[in-house]
Image: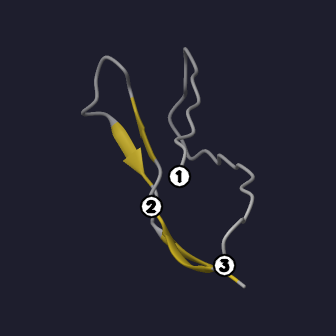
Amino acid sequence: MNESKAFTSLLWEGVYNYAYAARATTPGKFVMPPAKAEEIHQPETFGRSASNKVIIE
């Protein structure tokens, strides 16, 4: 699985949505790992999403 990255020089406090498209190439049941966001110079400031299950038929 490839890693997706986004960058901004300023991000105000709040809730943000980040979406991406993925192409299914193999059928099966997979676990989508949680996304994590952190400040480059202060990694103790971070946020994390929930993981999810994906079923490709």
Secondary structure at badge 2 equals loop
Residue position for label 1: 1
| Mark 1: amino acid | Met
Image spot of residue 52 (x, y percent): 51, 72
Is residue 51 positioned above or below 45 on the image?
A: below
- Residue in the image at 65% along x and 48% along y: 17
Q: Residue furthest front?
A: 26
Residue position for label 2: 33
Secondary structure at badge 3 equals loop
Residue 12, numbered label: none
Q: From mark 1 to mark 3, how far is it between C-alphas?
A: 15 Å
- Residue in the image at 55% along x and 33% along y: 5
Q: Quadrant of residue 29?
A: bottom right
Q: From mark 3 to mark 2, how far is it between C-alphas?
A: 18 Å
Residue 27, numbered label: 3
Foreground pick, 35 / 24: 24
- Residue in the image at 45% along x and 65% along y: 50
Foreground pick, 57 / 4: 57
